[in-house]
Image (spheres, rainbow, N blue to C red):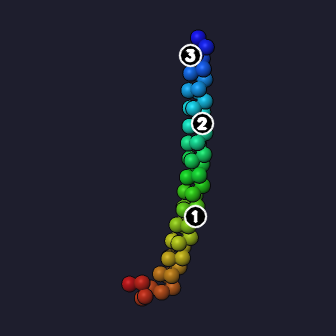
């Protein structure tokens, strides 16, 4: 029984490490995704402002 307990504990530890790593990656992607959304919003505001004040240049 001791061998199976060790194997089970090892499997649980491995899964916990994997889950922790994927959670950290998901958080990093979430932060980067928010930054990309903000950058997109800023670019769209600048573009719309430019088009509004320079309509002949943008055609």
Q: In this rendering, is residue 17 above or below 33?
A: above
Determine which residue is flagged by label 2. Answer: 17
Query: In this view of the protein, which residue sits in the foreground, 32 or 25?
Result: 25
Q: What element carries label 2?
A: helix
Check if mark 2's residue and mark 3's residue have beta carbons within 8 Å.
Answer: no
Q: How far apart are marks 3 and 1 (CA)?
A: 51 Å
Query: In the image, what residue occupies the spot 57% across and 47% down?
Result: 25
Q: Distance between the residues labelled 2 and 1?
A: 32 Å
Determine which residue is flagged by label 1. Answer: 38
| Outermost residue to the front | 3
Instruction: Say which label, 2 or 1, has the lower sequence index.
Output: 2
Query: In the image, what residue occupies the spot 60% across and 48% down?
Result: 27
Q: Quadrant of residue 41?
A: bottom right
Q: Is mark 3 on a helix, strand or loop?
A: helix
Query: In this view of the protein, which residue sits in the foreground, 33 or 5?
Result: 5
**Closer mark to the observer between disc 2 and disc 1:** 2
Determine which residue is flagged by label 3. Answer: 4
Q: Position of residue 54 (x, y in %)?
A: 48, 87
Q: Position of residue 44 (x, y in %)?
A: 51, 71
Q: How crowded is mark 1: few (under 14 residues within 10 Å), some or many (20 or more)?
A: few
**Closer mark to the observer between disc 2 and disc 3:** 3
Instruction: Say which label, 3 or 1, has the lower sequence index.
Output: 3
Query: In this view of the protein, which residue sits in the foreground, 46 or 4?
Result: 4
Q: Residues within 10 Å of mark 2 (few under 14, many from 20)?
A: few
Q: Which mark is residue 48?
A: none
Q: Is residue 24 toward the left or the right of residue 51 in the image?
A: right
Q: In this rendering, is residue 28 above or below 52?
A: above
Q: Position of residue 57 (x, y in %)?
A: 43, 88
Query: In the image, what residue occupies the spot 58% across and 61% down?
Result: 35
Quadrant of the frame with the C terminus: bottom left
């Amino acid at each position: 029984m001791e061998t199976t307990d060790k194997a089970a504990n090892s499997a649980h530890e491995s899964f916990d490490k994997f889950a922790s790593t994927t959670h950290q990656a998901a958080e990093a992607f979430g932060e980067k995704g928010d930054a990309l959304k903000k950058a997109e919003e800023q670019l769209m505001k600048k573009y719309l402002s430019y088009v509004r004040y320079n309509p002949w240049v943008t055609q």
